[in-house]
Image (spheres, rainbow, N blue to C red):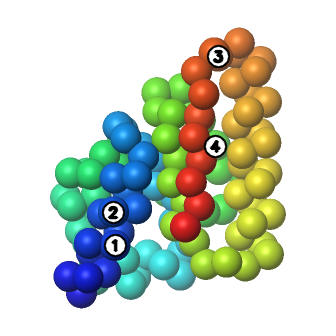
Amino acid sequence: RSQAQRTLISLLDRRPGRKVLVLDKTVSGPLALVANIGVLKEHGVEKLFHLEPGLKVDDGSMKEVVYLVRPTIGNMRLISEQIIEAEERMSKRKDTATMHFSIY
């Protein structure tokens, strides 16, 4: 358990600052055994979502999005759609900041 928690913290700390964490629903249960919400917040997680169609990860307040998902074709399609849509919305808002997306 402690090794898994260290690995998770290492992944989160690779991206500095406040971040959005998007989880595959099948990862949520096992993740809860490794780290509670307090640990996630200590390492910059401000918002936590499940990966699902129509999810908007770019509210303008955070520029870091970390996906923790199983490597399935369906998940990759959802993630690619969300990234493309986020970039399109940022372009329309003329937002000059860059969002970073990490997938683990």
**N-terminal-most mark, 3 or 4:** 4
Label 1 environment density (alpha carbons within 10 Å; few <14, some 14–19, many ≥20): few
Instruction: For marks 2 and 4, give the one nearer the viewer.
Output: 2
Q: Residue at x 79, y 30 (%)?
A: 88
- Disc 3 marks which amino acid? Asp
Cα–Cα gap, marks 2 and 4: 25 Å
Provide the secondary structure element on which disc 2 rests. helix
Cα–Cα gap, marks 3 and 2: 29 Å
Mark 3 lies on residue: 95
Label 3 environment density (alpha carbons within 10 Å; few <14, some 14–19, many ≥20): few
Cα–Cα gap, marks 3 and 4: 16 Å
Mark 1 lies on residue: 7
When the figure is inspected, residue 18 is found, relative to residue 72, above or below; the finding is above
**N-terminal-most mark, 4 or 1:** 1
Circles 1 and 2, Cβ within 8 Å, touching? The answer is yes
Q: Residue at x 34, y 73 (%)?
A: 7
Label 4 environment density (alpha carbons within 10 Å; few <14, some 14–19, many ≥20): few
Cα–Cα gap, marks 4 and 1: 27 Å
Mark 4 lies on residue: 56
